[in-house]
Amino acid sequence: MALAAAMLVSGAALSATAAEPAAAAASAPTATTESGGLGSIVDDYFSRVPTDYTEESWAPFAAALTSAQLVRASAESTPAQIIEAKTSLLDAAAALQTVSAGSFEPITNNTFWTDTDGNPISSQGGGIFRFGDTYYWYGVRYLEADPYRQSPSKIYSKATFGSIPVYSSKDLVNWTFENDVATRDTTLSIPASAGSYFSDLKTLGDAAWVGRLGVTYNENTGKFVLISQMNNNDPNAANVYSVLFLQADSPTGDFSYANLQTQIVNSPTRGTGDQTVFTDDDGTDYLIFSNSRGRGTGFVSKIADSDSLSIEPATAISRNAAGREGNAMFRLDDTYYVAASALHGWNTSVNYVVESTGAGIQGTYGPEYVLPGTEKDYSHVTQTGFFVTVHGTKQDTVLYAGDRWAEFAWNGSGYNQWTPLSKTDDGLEFNSLSNWEFNAVTGEWRVGPKNNYVLNPDFAADRVAVSNITGWTNVPDADNAAASFTSNVSPGADKTRFALRLGAAGAFSGAVQQTNDVPAGVYRFSAKAKSTGGLEHARVVITGAAGEVYTLDLAAVGGDWTNVELPDLALTGGAVTVSIEARSAGGNQSVTIDGLSLVAQPSDPTALQALVDAQSGRESADYGSTSWQPFAAALATAQAVLAAPAASQASLDGARAALEQAAASLCSAVTSVSVHSDRSVFTIGEALDAGTLSVTATRADGTTATLTPEQFQVAGFVSDVAGDPVVTVTVDPSLTATDAAPVEATLTLAVRVAWNSSTAYNGGDTVAFDGSVWLASWWTSGQTPGDPNGPWQQLIEVDGVAVWTPSRIFEAGEHATLGGVEYVARWWTRGQEPGDPNGPWASVTG
């Protein structure tokens, strides 16, 4: 206790010492306003374009920017005026609202991220803070980061401080490197009162440890304050811890030493175990931490309002004897949440959460619970890093920023793994996603198209060899004889640390399974596998929520890692089980698998949808039934494919091709028909040849076509007796619309006895001769029809009107046509051709 009291006095003295120069500077004039950082901030904000923002938010911002520029331009501006102008400008910028609705930007985990210049982002143990309208990401670049990134295939046992880079972003996805705000050469001026092991540290490069940092803005001093852990080289481990304060005039400027605090009141140990900086909605800043050496108690301490260069007495909010690290806070719906990881050296674990139950941030907190969604893959194989709360135009979203680097512990690709949290009536939910998309303007997020729905797919979450893999369930068969047949062996495929092995020294039979909710869709499963051979079976079985079963046989893989895949898995959505199964009757046989992936196959329904939209307006009445029926079937199939929750690109393309072909084969329906025959007179017993009929069809689209005998049927022709049969020509139903009435036309033909030279005919008898009907005017025998003055009259009619022939007798008033002109007989006439104006015929049609 005496030692702790001494540290308290020392820490308080250091804080007061550092605060005095800041207070003095605030009241004294300055020769240049640039020293307060106002110039760089003003220059930055002059790049904003008014039309990008709402008028309501732009007006106060423009006023603050103008005021800041005036302060900057005046040689008489005091530090207090500079601070006020800077703070007002930052506040106005923070309130800017874009007119744009933003866009969804992809966040891909399990990779090493790069900045907008393509350089690696190295930012461990830090945080993201919004100053003005810009997000700034601070963290530590350790010297081992680059070689580990190039070959993350072994454990690096140390983390050597290199620098503190800062990156800026407007959308939390695309990050621009701004500056190394502190480096190994950043000087320290630690007074002797802190102890020789601290005062001997002349630069940050001399420290044994620098990390776990955050940044605040102090409205009283106009300074940006970086608060970090820093350890000295004291062989007495209890004395190495401290909280370091650096400050700068701008968020991206060079930070310099400001203070050191070795003891926080109410904490049982010096410094902090793990820490993050949290800024509340009202702008008040807090340090969230656990005590060093044991880390059994979680604390919330206010950061001094006066200058942000000291930590006020701590309030304990949680207790767990096993210890917690990675302590970080966020606020959502007026509730404060503090999450932390298990204590085992920056390695992965579930997230343990306590949440406020009463009076504010330093009030009471409820019991600790495991954050749902972090169990199956230990928080996407991370430890708690920090949180970012985005107040969007449509919703508030909390981003979990997980830290995977674990001092380069060979536990998966990528240092930073970010996922969104959800809050429902049931509470918080951690969404373990490998690929998702975020809109920083609206606050909305959605699962990305490349998300892997297998959790802990590289079997890296456990960190050590185990027989029960996190997130996976061992399911031995009833006749399994092995006590254990699963393990995470090392190394895995592609130099990963672990892989899943199913095998035993003796006979075994069983499976390792995982069940997750998967949206409806078409998926591809892939993995890497190898086998000793000799297994009775080795396979991956994927079972969908509706009972779909897909099997990937691993029997063919050999002793080297082999890529295997199972595409086109149509899953209806819901609980999907991935089961790795093996059986061996002998001993020392196994199958090993790694890098499991269940990802939606990309598909684009745009072309099919456009085709369906274009074809849906067609009506069955407009098309022949034979062509309409396959078209209607193809259209229905295409619509079903579009409506299906799981449609592969192959099914989309197939439906489109079938519909295109069916549409191209559509024939306009025959709506009417006319019939004409070059031969209208037949002799008794003679057959009607349909080929002699000229049948013209008119279609729904207005076009016409001559039908072949195969396209119509003829009925009503009878030639066994003389008469005038009415022949009906009916269009084949395949050419008319579905369910349409028969389309038909009639034609009257003549059937007569054939003229015979030896037969005597009475007046009024008719015969067929030379393709015409002849009427006997009087008794005759042996006289061949054709003499215009003889006994036979040639009778020809078209559409019920007589055609003038030289041999036909016309009575007064009878009509006849010749050359397309209709005439009427003035008196009895025979053999007198119409056309003579003085003759027996008068023109009717002119």
Image (tube, grey):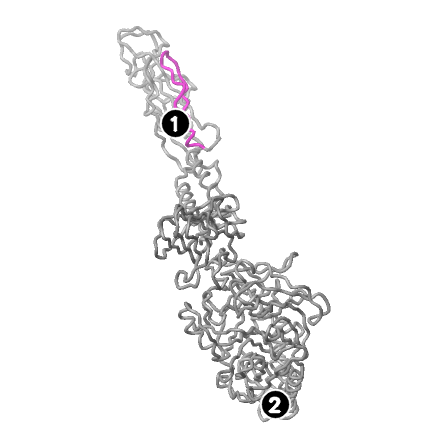
Q: Which image quadrant for residue 97?
A: bottom right
Could you say whether the residue bearing mark 2 is in a helix, strand or loop? helix
Q: Which residue is mark 2?
A: 193
Report the amino acid beneath label 1. Answer: Phe
User: Does the segment drawn in magenta span residue 2?
Assistant: no
Q: Which residue is mark 1?
A: 712
Mark sitting on residue 235: none
Instruction: Report x, y in % for residue 536.
Output: 39, 45
Q: Is residue 738 above or below residue 573?
A: above
Instruction: Report x, y in % for residue 299.
Output: 65, 73
Cα separation, mark 2 vs mark 1, equals 113 Å
- Label 2: how many Cα within 10 Å (few below 14, some 14–19, many 20+): some
Residue range highlighted in magenta: 712-736
244 or 466, which is in the foreground?
466
Q: Which image quadrant for residue 16?
A: bottom right
Q: Is 329 left, or right, of 771 in this rendering?
A: right
2 vs 1, front mark: 2
Could you say whether the residue bearing mark 1 is in a helix, strand or loop? strand
Q: Which image quadrant for residue 821?
A: top left
Q: Residue 619: in sight, yes or no? A: yes
181 or 191, which is in the foreground?
191
User: Does the segment drawn in magenta span residue 719?
Assistant: yes
- Label 1: how many Cα within 10 Å (few below 14, some 14–19, many 20+): some
Report the amino acid beneath label 2. Answer: Ser
